[in-house]
Image (cartoon, rainbow, N blue to C red):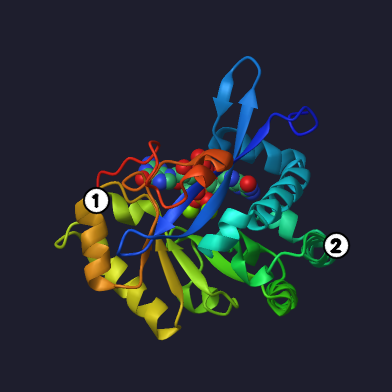
C-alpha cells in the first residue's frame, strides 16, 4: 500500500489576501507512484473512500499537517493550515479522541488548524455530526465547508453547521465576469458569509480579473489558485513561504 511504502507526499497551496500576502495553506495529498509518476488525488481519493483506505490516509495527512504547523518557519509567518477530512474519516467513532491525542502529542496550536469538510457529512445523522463538530471546536480547531455551492443541501440546512469558513467552489470562479450569472450567485453567497461572519476562500483563481472582482466585492476574501501558486511540495514552499522564491508564478 502506498502509505506503508512511503509513496504519499504532502503538498501545499497558498491562500493569499488582497495584498498578495500568504495567510494560510491548504494541505493536499499526492501519490508518487514508482511507475506511473505523480498521481492527483482526484484519481485515487474516490477509490480510497470506497475501500476505507481514506481513513489511514487522512490520519497520515493530519499527522503531516501538525508537523508542518510545528515548523519554525510556519510559526514565524503565523500561517494557518487547512486539511481535507473525508466524511468517512470524520464519522469514525474515535475521530475526536484521535485528533485530541495528536494535538496534545505534537503540541500544536489547534486554533491554526482548519478541517475542510463537505456537505456529504450531512448524509449522516445531523445532530450527531453537529455534536462532534462542537466537541472539536472546543479543542480550538476551525471548520471550513469545502466546495461550497455545489451540493444539494439547502443553505438553511448548511448554515446549521458550526463552521468558520466557506470555500467557494472553483466552478463559480471559472467564468466569473461582472455580468455573468455566476457573479450574482457569488455576490449572494458572499452576503450570506458576511451575515454569519464567516471567512471566505475562493478556489481556482486563475486570472487577475477574477481576483480583482472578488476582492472588490469582499476585501477580506482569501484567494487560492494557479494565479498565485500551484500546489507545491511542502518542503519547497517552506523555503520561500511568502512566494518570493523561484517557484512562484508571480503573474498577478
Ligand atoms: P479540494 O479540497 O477542493 O482542493 C482544491 C483542488 O483544486 C486541488 O486539487 C487543487 O490543486 C486544485 N486547484 C487549485 N487551484 C486551482 C486553479 O487555479 N485551477 C484549477 N483548475 N484547479 C486548482 P487536487 O490537489 O487535485 O485535489 C483534488 C481533491 O482531492 C481536493 O479538492 C479534495 O477533495 C481531495 N483531496 C486532496 N487531498 C486530500 C486529502 O488529504 N484527504 C482527502 N480526504 N481528500 C483530499
Ligand atoms: Mg479542500
Ligand atoms: Mg474545494
Q: Which of 167 and 216 lies nearest the eye of the viewer? A: 216
Q: Secondary structure at mark 1?
A: loop
Q: Position of residue 246 (x, y in %)?
A: 38, 36
In this rendering, the answer to whether 7 lies above or below 232 is above
- The residue under the point 54% across, 33% down is 40
Of pointers 1 and 2, the one earlier in the residue sequence: 2
Farthest-out residue, top: 35
Q: Quadrant of residue 124?
A: bottom right
Q: Which of 216 and 178 lies nearest the eye of the viewer? A: 216
Q: Position of residue 126 (x, y in %)?
A: 68, 73
Q: Position of residue 242 (x, y in %)?
A: 42, 52
- The residue under the point 14% across, 62% down is 179
- The residue under the point 31% across, 46% down is 227
Q: Which of 190 and 246 lies nearest the eye of the viewer? A: 246
Is residue 10 left or right of 147 when viewed as pictured? right
Label ID, residue 3: none
In this rendering, the answer to whether 133 lies above or below 48 is below
Q: Secondary structure at mark 2?
A: loop
The answer to whether one can see residue 108 in this image is: yes
| Residue that mark 2 sits on | 94
- The residue under the point 83% across, 61% down is 105
Q: Position of residue 76 (x, y in %)?
A: 55, 62
The answer to whether one can see residue 84 in this image is: no
| Residue that mark 1 sits on | 175
- Pointer 1 local density, CA inside 10 Å: few below 14, some 14–19, many at least 20: few
Is residue 245 left or right of 77 when viewed as pictured? left
Amino acid at each position: 500500500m502506498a502509505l506503508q511504502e512511503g509513496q504519499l507526499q504532502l503538498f501545499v497551496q497558498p491562500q493569499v489576501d488582497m495584498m498578495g500576502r500568504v495567510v494560510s495553506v491548504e494541505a493536499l495529498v499526492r501519490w508518487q507512484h514508482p511507475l506511473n509518476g505523480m498521481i492527483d488525488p482526484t484519481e485515487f481519493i474516490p477509490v480510497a473512500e470506497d475501500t476505507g483506505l481514506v481513513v489511514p490516509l487522512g490520519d497520515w495527512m493530519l499527522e503531516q499537517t501538525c508537523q508542518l504547523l510545528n515548523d519554525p518557519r510556519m510559526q514565524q509567518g503565523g500561517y494557518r493550515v487547512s486539511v481535507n477530512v473525508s466524511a468517512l474519516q470524520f464519522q469514525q467513532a474515535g475521530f475526536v479522541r484521535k485528533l485530541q491525542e495528536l494535538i496534545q502529542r505534537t503540541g500544536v496550536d489547534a486554533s491554526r488548524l482548519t478541517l475542510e469538510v463537505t456537505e456529504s457529512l450531512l448524509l449522516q445523522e445531523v445532530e450527531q455530526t453537529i455534536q462532534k463538530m462542537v466537541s472539536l471546536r472546543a479543542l480550538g480547531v476551525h471548520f471550513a465547508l469545502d466546495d461550497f455551492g455545489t451540493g444539494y443541501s439547502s443553505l438553511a440546512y448548511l448554515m446549521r453547521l458550526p463552521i468558520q469558513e466557506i470555500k467557494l467552489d472553483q466552478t463559480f470562479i471559472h467564468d466569473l465576469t461582472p455580468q455573468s450569472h455566476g457573479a450574482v450567485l457569488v455576490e449572494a453567497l458572499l452576503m450570506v458569509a458576511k451575515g454569519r461572519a464567516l471567512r471566505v476562500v475562493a478556489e481556482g483563481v486563475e486570472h487577475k480579473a477574477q481576483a480583482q472582482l472578488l476582492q472588490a466585492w469582499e476585501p477580506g476574501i482569501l484567494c487560492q489558485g494557479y494565479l498565485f501558486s500551484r500546489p507545491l511540495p511542502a518542503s519547497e514552499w517552506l523555503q520561500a513561504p511568502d512566494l518570493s522564491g523561484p517557484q512562484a508564478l508571480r503573474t498577478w
